[in-house]
């Protein structure tokens, strides 16, 4: 085991210090310097965003990458933007959080049985990280899996996260049938094995067009609650 990644604190320190991808470093820092007018008076995080949540989690939630003016501003996954409002409201309704909102790292949000991360840790231009950039981030995700020994399953938000997690879990010896991504795509070998559940990403592009509705998203988390109960 790499001793520099031996626990969450050290892992997250290494994530935050990462500068492996020049394009992403330049973009995230430029966004943090220029800022959006609505947040002109606020400091921006402007660095890679580590995962967070319950270190005894039974469920890992995996998104795509930080939003330019959400997580890249606040420094916490799905915090400070519309995607987060949609996600945490749904998690709250199923008892996975202590509150339905996530505005800042100091807002008192706590996750219950859930750990939230992403396949990419830096805000990418046009929300599109390259395959190489995702590859550079993958060791951090692998180490989070190592540090979450109680996991029962993974919820992947969007096709990129779903395909990445299916590939990673299969490479780690989890015998998952290769089910193509769709909303509510589900793959598991037997009731005692690790499972993977797919959902449309709670981005504004999906939620404002009705591709992902609150009822559809609630179905995802009700399924998760059923799987771990």
Image (spheres, grey):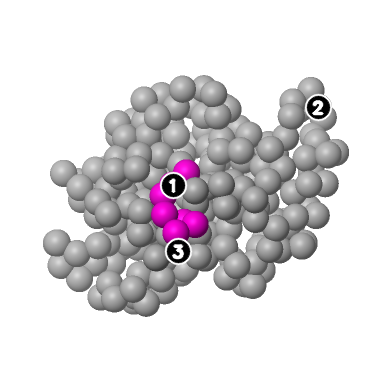
Q: Residue at x 50, y 65 (%)?
A: 139
Task: Give the main secondary structure of the magenta stretch.
Answer: helix
Q: Residue at x 62, y 72 (%)?
A: 131
Specify the quadrant of the image occupied by residue 222. top left
Considering the numbered disc 2 on the image, is that residue within a helix, a strand or a loop? Answer: loop
Q: Name the residue beneath numbered marker 2.
A: 40
N-terminal label among 2 and 3 = 3
Residue 39: percent from left, percent from top: 76, 28
Residue 164: percent from left, percent from top: 47, 68
Would you say 8 lies left or right of 102 here? left
Q: CA distance from mark 2 to mark 3?
A: 40 Å
What are the residue bounds of the magenta stretch?
3-9
Q: Name the residue beneath numbered marker 3.
A: 2
Q: Nearer the viewer, residue 112 or 21?
A: 21
Residue 105: percent from left, percent from top: 55, 29
N-terminal label among 1 and 3 = 3
Q: Residue at x 74, y 49 (%)?
A: 28
Q: CA distance from mark 2 to mark 1?
A: 32 Å
Q: Nearer the viewer, residue 68 or 106?
A: 106
Above/below status of 2 relative to 30:
below
Q: CA distance from mark 1 to mark 3?
A: 13 Å
Q: Name the residue beneath numbered marker 1.
A: 8
Residue 3: percent from left, percent from top: 44, 59
Tag in front: 2 or 3: 3
In magenta segment, residue 5: yes
């Amino acid at each position: 085991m790499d001793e520099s990644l031996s626990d969450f604190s050290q892992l997250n320190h290494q994530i935050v210090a990462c500068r492996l991808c020049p394009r992403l470093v330049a973009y995230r820092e430029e966004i943090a310097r220029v800022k959006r007018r609505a947040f002109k008076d606020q400091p921006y995080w402007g660095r890679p965003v580590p995962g967070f949540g319950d270190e005894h989690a039974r469920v890992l939630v995996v998104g795509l990458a930080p939003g330019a003016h959400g997580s890249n501003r606040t420094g916490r996954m799905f915090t400070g933007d519309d995607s987060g409002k949609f996600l945490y409201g749904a998690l709250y309704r199923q008892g996975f959080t202590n509150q339905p909102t996530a505005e800042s790292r100091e807002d008192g949000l706590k996750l219950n049985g859930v750990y939230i991360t992403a396949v990419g840790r830096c805000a990418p231009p046009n929300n599109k990280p390259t395959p190489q950039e995702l590859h550079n981030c993958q060791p951090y995700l692998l180490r989070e899996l190592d540090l979450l020994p109680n996991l029962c399953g993974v919820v992947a938000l969007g096709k990129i996260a779903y395909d990445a997690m299916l590939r990673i879990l299969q490479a780690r010896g989890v015998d998952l049938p290769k089910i193509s991504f769709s909303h509510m795509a589900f793959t598991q070998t037997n009731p005692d094995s690790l499972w993977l559940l797919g959902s449309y990403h709670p981005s504004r592009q999906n939620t404002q067009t009705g591709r992902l509705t609150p009822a559809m998203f609630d179905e995802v988390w009700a399924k998760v609650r059923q799987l771990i109960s």
